Image: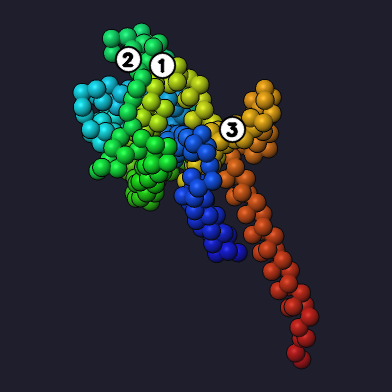
Amino acid sequence: MKTLLKYAQVALVVLAIAALLAAPLVLKPYGIFVLSQWAVMAIAAVGLNLTLGYAGQISLAQASFVGIGAYTVALLQPFGVPFALAFVAAGLLSFAIGWVLGYPALRVQHHYLAFVTLAFTTLVFLVMRNEEWLTGGIYGISNIKRPIILGWSTVKPVPFYYFALGMLALVTAIVWWLLRSPWGRAFTALRENPIRALSLGIDTRRYTLFAFAFGSALGGLSGAMHAPLVQFIEPTSFGLSLSLTLLLMVIVGGSGYFLGPFVGALVAVIMPEWLRFADGLYLIAYALLVLLLMTFCPSGILGLFGRLANLIETRAASARRQSLSAKLDQKPVSS
């Protein structure tokens, strides 16, 4: 049964990848834009899932790192800096700031840490809004050009969509490798029981800082993709609402599940577009769907499927035991 479930999971992932690759053949430009936005936000959600789902550190600052990455690319572009260098700079800057922000995580936990990261989000938002000489203030930065990579232009929607999809695939591969390395196992130990992890010789200080920094770097890389996607950025886009949306992606998809952020981003980015046929009621319908999901399955969508898989496996094992017991009862006893 376990083997069958694993094959089913692999088949679903392959079908999802095939659907994403073939999507531009049937979608209009706006639909391609929405899928590109899903890919970009999924990168930030993967970073938050690493911090929250694996390292167990609650952060409301992910939107700030998305903003830092977006403004880094937007500010470097007028100076003729190639997108590749600006992209790397956005990730490194977010990594460094995330490392510094990780220090409060060494002293506070849970909702106290959430308030610390919330304060950081507010600080970054105020800088973006008030420092007009740097960020343009409430007027933002416009005319952000989409990159040309090795002669391949991503100006049109379809090329940029495949570019965003490729970057998401690259990030996914890196995180997959990281979580199966000793670092990933240390993150899990840190989340489950920090005291036991410390007693086993795990440097909880270093791993906590790295979880914050690496998750923040992925947020910065997401912002570096977001800026050329929308081609206009302003401070409101990177406020608390985006942090809560990213948190929603991780929790609804399934915190601590590798594919959780992808499913959560699907719910947070694409589902509202599917519900627009309801006109002004679509936000109410969307909120009710999320509320029902969190009420009956707090472990998220993948957690729900995991519970169903465990239930099916348990019932199958019980049926096998009953069948074996019946066969033993029918077997004649030799004299």
Residue pictured at 54% horizontal, 46% vertical: 26
Q: Is mark 1 on a helix, strand or loop?
A: helix
Query: Extreme bottom residue here?
Result: 335
What percent of the width, then of the height, locates residue 19? 52, 50
Q: What residue does disc 1 label? A: 235
How far apart, in angstroms, are the residues tagged by discs 2 and 1? Answer: 8 Å
The amino acid type of the residue labelled 1 equals Pro
Which quadrant holds the C terminus? Answer: bottom right
Residue 243's place in the image compared with 171, above or below, is above
Of circles 2 and 3, the one toward us is 3
What percent of the width, then of the height, locates residue 124? 37, 16
Label 1: how many Cα within 10 Å (few below 14, some 14–19, many 20+): many
Q: Quarter of the image holding residue 330?
A: bottom right
Residue closer to the observer: 250 or 324: 250
What percent of the width, then of the height, locates residue 56? 45, 35
Q: What residue does disc 2 label? A: 135
User: In the picture provided, is 142 more to the left or to the right than 266?
Assistant: left
The amino acid type of the residue labelled 2 equals Thr
Q: What residue does disc 3 label? A: 273
Residue 131's place in the image compared with 283, above or below, is above
- Mark positioned earlier in the residue sequence (2 or 3): 2
Q: Is label 3 in contact with label 1 (beta carbons under 8 Å)? A: no
Of circles 3 and 1, the one toward us is 3
- Residue 271 can be seen, yes or no: yes
- Mark positioned earlier in the residue sequence (3 or 1): 1
